[in-house]
Image (cartoon, rainbow, N blue to C red):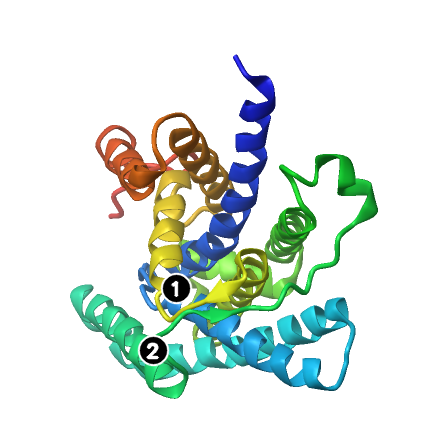
Amino acid sequence: MDWSYFFELALGGLTRGSIYAMIALGYTMVYGIIELINFAHGEIYMIGAFTALIVASVLGIYGFPAFAILLIAAAVAVIYCSAYGYTMEKVAYKPLRNAGRLSPLISAIGMSLFLQNYVILAQTSDFLPFPALIPEFDFLEPVAYIFGSSDFVIVIASALCMAGLTLFIKFTKMGKAMRATAQNRKMAMLLGIDADRVISITFIIGSSLAAMGGVLIASHVGQVNFMIGFIAGVKAFTAAVLGGIGSIPGAMLGGLFLGLAESYATGYISSDYEDVFAFTLLVVFLIFRPSGIMGKAPVEKV
């Protein structure tokens, strides 16, 4: 067995899985609070990448250092996409809060299509080059051929975001309010928790993570397009389901699991069936473990 190739695939899967996990966190947080699959979440990821491209293009004219451009572009993308997430929740989801389960789902699909076409009209339908903003780190030179600087930054940034979110949910007052709202929204409201504010902040946090993922993967791949959000969104949703939709640790684990599974399957079988592997895995889990790796079977409420 070629162990160097095995570890090369593992590192590639770790990078891919880190991005899936970051986006999946937004899916699972929203579902945990209001039981909605936000299918427009992938488009927030795409808008984050386009926003960073615009900011990077402007700053590049004035000769800013590459890594400074990356940090500024990421910060602007996070703020911009947070505003998108907040507005989307108020416009497309809040009016349907008490409607049947199908109505918010249709609204989410409609928002996804709207944002795709909005970017086509406002920007372009073509692939655009994204500048390489992540510098080459000297300490990674011995393994740069399998794990470059962009891979390292993606994994570290994802780990920090996940750790920060976990601490926020566990120890802050708003995090406790989120957990209470997820368990029983009506009871939380009776106890004085502003559920609308909790839901809005949940969308803001999820959109921020998606924007960060969009910036990092665009810098890693070197191009952006209006369709990148759809593919990444569907894969991240798959990761959230694999880990256990509604579970934050599950979203992280599901993203890494999916990334590694795709990497090994494409490396040892064929890259032509990359999406087939992912969705076959999803079908298998839905059949044999529908609650996911860390999800819990639903308890009937009386």
The residues tagged by marks 1 and 2 sit, at their Cα atoms, a distance apart of 10 Å
Label 1 with label 2: CB-CB less than 8 Å:
yes
Q: Quadrant of residue 85?
A: bottom left
Residue appearing at x 34%, y 78% in the figure: 115
- Vertical position of residue 192 compared to residue 134: above or below: below
- Vertical position of residue 8 compared to residue 276: above or below: above
Q: Position of residue 232 (x, y in %)?
A: 40, 56
Does residue 215 appear in the picture of this structure? Answer: yes
> Is tag 1's residue or tag 2's residue first in the polypeptide sequence?
2
Residue denoted by label 2: 115
Residue appearing at x 18%, y 71% in the figure: 103
Q: Position of residue 39 (x, y in %)?
A: 31, 64
Give, as a three-letter code, the residue at label 2: Leu
Residue denoted by label 1: 229
Structural crowding at the residue carrying mark 1, measured as other residues with C-alpha within 10 Å and reported as few (<14), some (14–19) or many (≥20): many
Does residue 192 appear in the picture of this structure? Answer: no
- Vertical position of residue 259 compared to residue 224: above or below: above
Q: Quadrant of residue 226?
A: bottom left
Q: Position of residue 40 (x, y in %)?
A: 34, 68
The residue closer to the viewer here, 104 or 283, is 283
Residue 273: which disc?
none
Structural crowding at the residue carrying mark 2, measured as other residues with C-alpha within 10 Å and reported as few (<14), some (14–19) or many (≥20): some
Q: Position of residue 210 (x, y in %)?
A: 50, 63
- The kind of secondary structure element at disc 1 is helix
Give, as a three-letter code, the residue at label 1: Gly
